[in-house]
Image (cartoon, rainbow, N blue to C red):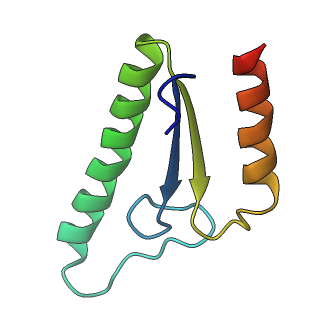
Amino acid sequence: MFPRQKIAIFIDGCFWHRCPEHYTSPKANSAFWAEKAARNVELYHETNKRLEELGWTVLRFWEHQDLAGEPVHRVIEVLRLAES
């Protein structure tokens, strides 16, 4: 987080946030896990909305992404915009 610039950064886990590339539903107790993962997705949408209503920029990346690649470039870009 960059509170002064109002930038929130989240790294979402592929399992917990239902990554479209890597999420697989567990075989055991599948109904529970499907509901849990769906609620996690709802919560992060609600969090994004609340933060954006407060004037924050929200950046979300997947845990499988090379954080030294696109994510870091995006963070730098948003920080530069916030400083200008």
- Answer with left or right where residue 81 lies relative to residue 48: right
74 above or below 48? below
Q: Residue at horizontal 39%, vertical 75%?
A: 25
Asked whether 33 or 8 is in front, the reply is 8
Instruction: Reply above or below: 60 against 46.
Output: below
Position of residue 26 measured from the top left corner of the image (x, y, whole percent)? 34, 82
Q: Residue at x 54, y 62 (%)?
A: 19
Image coordinates of residue 45 in percent, x first then y, are: 40, 35
> Residue 32 in the image: x percent, y percent?
17, 68
Note whether 63 is above or below 10 in the view shown: below
Q: Position of residue 50 (x, y in %)?
A: 36, 21
Left or right? Give the position of 9 relative to 66: left
Q: Image height check: is 18 above or below 7?
A: below
Q: Residue at x 46, y 76 (%)?
A: 24
Q: Residue at x 74, y 68 (%)?
A: 66
Q: Look at the image and tell me in which quarter the C terminus lies.
A: top right
